[in-house]
Structures are given as structure tokens and as C-alpha cells.
Amino acid sequence: MVLMRAEIISVGTELLVGSILNTNTQFLSQELLKCGVDVYYQTTVGDNPGRVIDTLKIAMDRSDFIILSGGLGPTEDDVTVESFARFIQKPLVFHAPTHRAILRRLKLRDLRMTRLIAKQCRVPQGSLVLENENGTAPGILYKAGGSGAAKWFLLLPGPPRELGPMFKKRAMPLFFRVSGIKKKRLLLRSVKITGLVEAQVAQKATDLLRMKPPLTVGIYARPEEVELKIMAKAINEKNAAKMTQKVEKIIRGRFGNKVFGVNEETLAESLGHLLRKKKKTLAAAESCTGGLLSHLITETPGSSDYFRGSVVAYDNRIKSGFLDVPQALLKKEGAVSAAVAQRMAQNIRSFFKADYGIGITGIAGPSGGSPQKPVGLVHIALATPSKTFSEKWRFQGSRSEIKHRAAHHALNLLRLALLQRVN
Amino acid sequence: MVLMRAEIISVGTELLVGSILNTNTQFLSQELLKCGVDVYYQTTVGDNPGRVIDTLKIAMDRSDFIILSGGLGPTEDDVTVESFARFIQKPLVFHAPTHRAILRRLKLRDLRMTRLIAKQCRVPQGSLVLENENGTAPGILYKAGGSGAAKWFLLLPGPPRELGPMFKKRAMPLFFRVSGIKKKRLLLRSVKITGLVEAQVAQKATDLLRMKPPLTVGIYARPEEVELKIMAKAINEKNAAKMTQKVEKIIRGRFGNKVFGVNEETLAESLGHLLRKKKKTLAAAESCTGGLLSHLITETPGSSDYFRGSVVAYDNRIKSGFLDVPQALLKKEGAVSAAVAQRMAQNIRSFFKADYGIGITGIAGPSGGSPQKPVGLVHIALATPSKTFSEKWRFQGSRSEIKHRAAHHALNLLRLALLQRVN
């Protein structure tokens, strides 16, 4: 089979009322893409047998590989397996290995088998059953139709921690094995850029964004960062890697220091790599970011190697009494000023015996602004072994967005300084 | 019209490849539910005119109110408006007010009108046009079919900050006005519980979860909290409020102090209300949470009224040199110990002149654990004006999850202490 069209169906009324965010669909889409399987539709339907069957009919008409998630559990609301069995007109049959696996799980927790739990041991006749390592409901892989127009169905449990491992470790390997479909080598590599908005990146990468398969580039914007995603399809991993490397080199050539990382790498991680490489340490004095900068830095495992710690000086008395910012300076310049940010950076650097000190002071809002010092005004200072300087920003957005933007720019300020070998 | 079936269609290849999470669909589902409109299906389709039209056909067969989001922008990939016009067989016509609005926006940024931007001034004949306050692409409301079997279509821009305000402020008020459909009074009230897992809450609320419309209760679990969502449909707001109040009272009676808030209220906000009410202040000394506790507290506007600040003592030398935790204690008990957590809480309380001090020390992992002190071990201490005590926890999960769980339990420890009038 050359062309394979996949479709994801999420079953769950909780998704239709917006009570939870559909992260399973994003996960499955990403994983299918990596296997070279293209997703054409994503549908969500409630826990209603009639509508689940209607949705299956539509999906079978337009797709070859249909992945359902959710509704496999033990409650009365879980109708996916029964609905699917009715749709393919097969009876539900008892699956002994699943029964034994559930009994083992129940025993560990000192629980007894109930009628509802036992429901999960019944699967449509002809199913390939996928063991659930992290829960009771098994997954199901089912082939319908002849070999010419085969349609594949995959039923997965809804809880992400059950769905994820089952999909990656069991379902996809089994699918490629029994279907005889060749897994394509799709290599994805994201190059992450900061300091430019999406339109600016797009303009400098127009030619790349127009490339056609098997080698394409997509653009995605996130707050404070733009991602250029290189996708290469090739007969083997080595060739695909060569293709992406070529494009990555072009992107790095054009965007220089504005490229801060690849794939899942965060700006804080990228800064962490630099600090570790240069054997330098960092301390921070935060006011309006309220601890967020430190939180972002300490999300990276091993950050204790280069992050000494910080003082969140939320109250002005902490700035003077604890960070030794002179009261006269606070009075003359105001707490939100370049002079105070710089003094915070210098003092935290020296108190915490770090190579670099960051000082942030600003107005996160929504109140506390004035015409001279509006909400969103933030001073970010960096103290290095030889000098201290600061930047003045005026950020837009909610309180939380202003905190995030300020923390992001503080990380980037030090990152750029380290790249420019500032001492 | 009595029964109104809504369907949400997201247009965007970036959703099909999993590059972004579909938060628009969740937002629209929640907002429609609040207006008493039930969503039956959610579909995602790529930026492909043929497939967008196929999806519209299916939607028109099964739904009365079809909301499309995304694909209204100026790029070649934005095909929603053209596809919709082809589907309803109407020509695209020039909309002068939109043209003027776009010119005004461009002028502010010193930009010129281009062919692609101008594309956004053309709407299907017969559309009601919705102004976009936060971007260039206007929204469109369109009625198809006779009054007996009227079908309504709403086209919204994809960026959440454009879609949200347009939907709430313009689209829904206009829809109810021109359609003559009566807005039902659906009141939602979420009661938020911490300290119990979903199964425990479900067991204590079995009778409530079995209630039938017009008054129902749903249960939703999030990390460290469980939400009981009361939904009441009534002829007017007053009656709906009475209905929800009755159930909320029952829930509060059963769960007592474990109820920490309602609706969007976070645990940090709930703690903030208590501190403000009692005119008390707080300071924190964080180790393994790395600033997250302070970040969560300072997400609440006005938190500077009760939050003095914190020290993130990531490095042991900061614990001793800056927080005055005796070196002998660190050596004897280890940095991750009840004694050190308590000393951190006491000292930050006294240094920062706060009524309450929180101290947190633990191992967030993934490395740094030992058989005696495994990853996830966290000591959380509270120093009050009269005493100091601590709790020992063993959290599961990733580094980030352990940080969040520890911060959550620290907030809850102080919240419970304030409720129990601890001094």
C-alpha cells in the first residue's frame, strides 16, 4: 500500500464539554507523523453508541487506518468496544490472558473482580489484543476488509499514561509487522529561534517554506519563539539525516545567534548548556517575575551545577534590607528603574558568589502602573565579572504573560552575552 | 428551535501534524456549553479546500450550528473562506468596513496593503461580518437554508487572542439576536477539592454523580485536585443559582476543608484570600521547588500585599551562608531533612519579617537519589508565630511533576493551618 490515510477519533463527552484538553490527539498525530503515517482528520464524539458508529462509518469511507482513543474503561459510560463490535458485526468474546492480567492487578491492590471490570475482558472476535501495562483495559488492533482495501482499526485506552506506552511499544510495532506496510523514515528536526516574530522569520525563510516533499520546512510560532520544522522522508535514516542537516546549516547561517536550540530544547536548557560548558555560575534577584525565572532554570535536571539560587524580592523592604539596594536609590529612581535592576544584579552576584547575576524589576500588573511607569515596563540587568548593564522592555499581555516574557528575555540576555564572550 | 446541535471544525494542517495543541476547541466547547448549546462533534481538517468542503457537507447533515476556526488569514494556506463560499455557492464580495479597518491597523505599524492582506476584505455574499479587534481577518456569521431547517455557520480566526474576544463579545450576542434562538440559562459551578484522589471523591459523591438534568454533577481530575462540576439549566439565572447552591452546600458539608475553591480559583489564590483576610504575610525558602512556589503565589494579582518574597537556596552554600542553616545540621541530618526544612522556614520567616515561613527541601530528580533518600522525597515545613512543624512526602513522577506536587502541598499546608487558626 502506497498511500495510507490515518484518522484519529477521540471518544469522550468530557472533551465535547471542554472539561479536558485533547492532548492524546496531539500525541498520536506527532507519533504517526514520525512513522511516516499522514493524519487527514481528527474527530471527537461523545460516549454515545449511535454517534460512535456514525463516526466510524464516515471514517471507514475516507481513511485506511483509524485510531480510536477513550471509552475502553469499566464504567457504564465506556461504550467504544461494544459500539465497534456492532459496527464490524462481530460478537464480543472472552479473552483469557486479559482476565488473568486484570486479576493480577486487582490482587496487588486487594480489590475484587466486579461485573463492570470483567467487561474489559471481552473483545470483538478476530481482534489482536494489546496488553495494558499501566491499567486494566486492553488495546485492540483489528483488520477489516480484504487485503486490497484493508482498513485497520486501533482502539486505545483514554488515560494518557496508558495510551502513550501502549501506542509506542505495542500497537505500532505490531501494526507494521502484521500489515506488511513498510515504515517510512521520516526525520523531524526543529530549529528554534528567538528575538524575531513569525512574519520576520517567514520573510527570511520564504524559499525554505516553499520546498516540496520529500524535504519540507514548516513554521510554527509560540510565545517568544518561532520554530522552523524540517521534515525529511528518505529510504533510510542516514539519508534523511543528511537532508535535514543541509537545511539546518542554511537556517543557522541566516539566523545566527537567534537560533537557541533544536527539538525539545528550551531556552533555559540552552543557557544551561552554555554555563556548564564555560564552567560559570548564575544567581538571580527577581522582583516582578516572582520566582518564574528560577523555576524555568531549575526545570533542567542538573541545574544545581550552575544555578546558585535566587532572591525573590517581592517587597521593597526585601530589596533594601536583604539585597542591600540603597533606600536613597529606591526613593530617587523608584523600585522599577535601571539603576535598581543593576544594583540587584550586582549584589546577588556578589552575595551568592556567582559569575553572573541577573536583576529583574518591573510592573506585571494588572494594577500598579502609571503614565510614567506603565504595566509591562520591565528592567532586566546583567552583572558580569567586569561590568553591569541593563535593558528596558515594555511587554504586552496579561500579568502571567508579562512575567513569562520578562523571564524569557532575561535568559536570552545572558545567553547572548555568553555567546559574545562577555566577561 | 428546541434542539440545537453544534459542531466545531478546526481548520489547520499544524493541528493534524500535532505541532500545536487544539486549545480553541476546548475554549469554544466550554463557552457554548455555558450558553446552553450542546456540542456533538469536534473535527479537525487540514488546509485543503476539497477536504474542508467534504467536512462541511458532513457537518451540515448532522448539525445545526457549525463553528469553524482557523484558515482566515492572509497566507496562501488560508483556504477556509474560499472553501466555505464554494460550499454555499456564493461569490466573494468586497467588504468596505473591513478594508478600512485593515488600512487603519496597517497604518499604525507603517505597513502597506498587499494582495494577500487584501484577500481578507472579501466575504461570501450574504455574510454578517464580525470585526476583529486583535487582528486583520474578520469573522463571518452566515445563515443557510429556510427558517424551518436553518443552518448557522460561524467562521472565526485561528489565533486564540483573536478568536476568544470575537466569539464572546461579537459572535454569540449577534447569533442569539439574529437567530431568535433563546439563550438558555446554564449555570456552571465547579467545586475544587484537594487531598483526595478521583476514586475517593467519586465514592463520597456517588449519589450526586447520578443526578439527571436539569441538575447534574460531573467529576474531573487534574494533578493534585479533583473538580466536581455542577450544571443547572433553568428558565432564569436566579433559579439556576438556587439549584447549584443547594448542591454546593452538600459538597462542602461532605468534603469540609478539602474544598479549596470554586471555578477558576487556584490553590495559591485561595491561600492568598485567606492571608489577606487575616492580614498575615508569608515568606518562603525553596530548595527543590526552585522558585515554583513563589511563581505560583505571584501569579495572583495583588500578591505583593501578603507575599514578602523568598530565597531559592539551590546550592547548599546558600542554605548555610545566606539562610543561616548551621553547617553542622546540614552535615548531620543532610540537606534533605525535616530539621533543615524547619530551620529554613524559621529563618526565612524571621529574616523577611513575615507571619509565616515555608521551607521546602527535597530531591526532584531524576538523579541525586539514594536508597535512604530516594528521588521524590520532600520535607515541607511551616513556621508560625508560635511553632514550627513539617511534613515528609514521597512524591512520584517526573522532575517537573515532583516540583509541582511539592509546591502544591506547601500551599495546602499553610491553607489548612490558617483554617485551623494555627498561630
Image: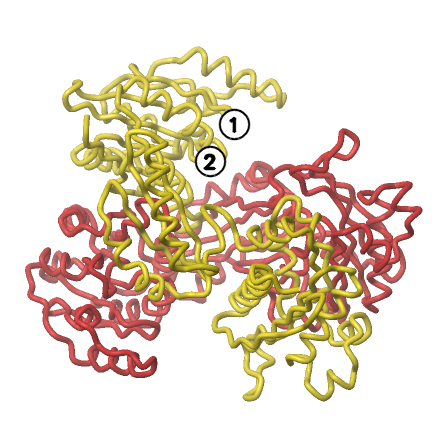
Chain colours: A yellow, B red
Q: Is residue B342 above or below residue A31?
A: below
Q: CA distance from mark 1 to mark 2?
A: 9 Å
| Quarter-of-image position of residue A325 | bottom right
| Quarter-of-image position of residue A87 | top left
The x and y percentages for residue B86 are 9, 57
* Label 1 in the same subunit as label 2: yes
Q: According to the image, label 2 marks what residue? A: A159
Q: Are marks 1 and 2 in contact (CB under 8 Å)?
A: yes
Q: Nearer the viewer, residue B423 or A299?
A: A299
The x and y percentages for residue A288 are 63, 70
Q: Residue furthest right?
A: B328
- Left or right: residue B285 compared with residue A306: right
- Left or right: residue A236 compared with residue B266: left
Q: Amino acid at mark 1?
A: Asn
Q: Nearer the viewer, residue B85 or A297?
A: A297
Name the image quarter holding the C terminus of chain A.
bottom right
Label 1 crowd bin: few (<14), some (14–19), many (20+), radius 10 Å: some
The chain ID associated with circle 2 is: A
Q: Is residue A289 above or below residue B402?
A: below
Q: According to the image, label 1 marks what residue? A: A134
The x and y percentages for residue B105 are 30, 79
Please indicate, yes or no, whether residue A303 appears anywhere in the rendered image. Answer: yes
Please indicate, yes or no, whether residue B233 appears anywhere in the rendered image. Answer: no
- Left or right: residue A139 compared with residue A295: left
| Quarter-of-image position of residue B260 | bottom right
| Element carrying mark 1 | loop
